[in-house]
């Protein structure tokens, strides 16, 4: 029996995706394996997909055109290694300069710097936020879980980059409300086991899902 299951349910007439964890020994890799087929599942309503029931591949409204991506720490390290550049070089060349000046890591966007001819050029290494995003409704518990995981991974990158000296000191002003939310989140959750797990992990299989349940 699978450790996790994705199901569809109806709440107040709206079809939503939910996640059931059957086995608390599951890892983050188990969750990603379970979540991955959703992009190609044409039975799932996709608000911005062509005809609303289509695979993400070939989507005319590709969310990679506008995504705000702060990579989780596992993805961040793998992206830099895959490009054969140092992490400081990766930060300087692949992240938005205006956000870097504020001490924040946002991949160059509009469209995402990794998008080539409509396709993600680092698909196997893409970040958690990219892996989890799907333009459909989620049950509240499921939404809370996947964003808790994705933001924990992004917070780990923010903390790591700061510790390594890749980022300047925070600026006095110039932040959007989202920027502030994220900085406060990274500060507040740096001691959570789920965030710490990203520092010790080489891969998503090393991160117990239980830290987020
Ligand atoms: S998740 Fe992104 S790529 Fe997939 S249908 Fe929605 S907008 Fe298109
Ligand atoms: S990293 Fe890949 S999946 Fe994520 S926004 Fe960029 S192109 Fe899209």
Image: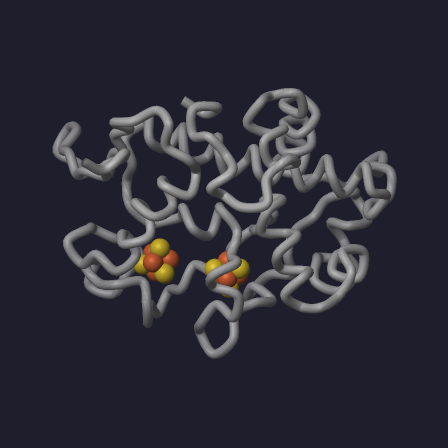
Instruction: Please give left or right for residue 71 compared with residue 184 in the image.
Output: left
**Placement of the C terminus among the 4 image quadrants:** top left
Instruction: State whether residue 114 is above or below residue 178.
Output: below
Q: Is residue 65 visible?
A: no
Q: Residue at x 12, y 33 (%)?
A: 13
| Residue 107: x %, y % from top left | 64, 56
Left or right placement of residue 56 versus residue 180 in this view = left
Query: x, y (%) of residue 36?
Result: 33, 52
Q: Quadrant for the N terminus, please.
A: top left
Residue lying at the far bottom of the rendered structure = 117
Residue 179 on image: x %, y %? 66, 38
Drawn side of residue 44 relative to residue 85, left or right: left
Tell how many labels: 0
Q: Is residue 111 above or below residue 44?
A: below
Q: Residue sitting at 76 percent across and 56 percent down?
A: 87
Residue 129 seen in the figure: yes
Position of 124 with respect to 23 (left or right) is right
Colour approach in the figure: one colour
């Amino acid at each position: 029996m699978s450790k996790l299951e994705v199901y569809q349910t109806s709440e107040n007439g709206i079809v939503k995706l939910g996640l059931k964890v059957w086995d608390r020994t599951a890892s983050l890799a188990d969750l990603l394996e379970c979540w991955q087929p959703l992009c190609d599942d044409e039975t799932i309503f996709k608000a911005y997909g062509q005809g609303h029931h289509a695979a993400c591949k070939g989507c005319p409204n590709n969310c990679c055109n506008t995504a705000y991506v702060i990579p989780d720490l596992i993805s961040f390290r793998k992206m830099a290694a895959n490009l054969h550049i140092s992490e400081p070089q990766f930060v300087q060349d692949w992240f938005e300069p205006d956000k870097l000046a504020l001490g924040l890591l946002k991949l160059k966007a509009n469209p995402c710097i990794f998008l080539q001819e409509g396709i993600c050029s680092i698909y196997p290494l893409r970040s958690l936020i990219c892996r989890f995003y799907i333009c459909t409704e989620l049950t509240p518990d499921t939404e809370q879980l996947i964003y808790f995981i994705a933001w924990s991974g992004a917070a780990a990158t923010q903390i790591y980059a700061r510790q390594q000296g890749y980022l300047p000191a925070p600026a006095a002003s110039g932040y959007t409300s989202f920027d502030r939310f994220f900085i406060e989140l990274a500060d507040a959750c740096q001691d959570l086991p789920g965030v710490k797990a990203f520092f010790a992990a080489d891969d998503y299989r090393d991160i117990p899902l239980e830290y987020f349940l």
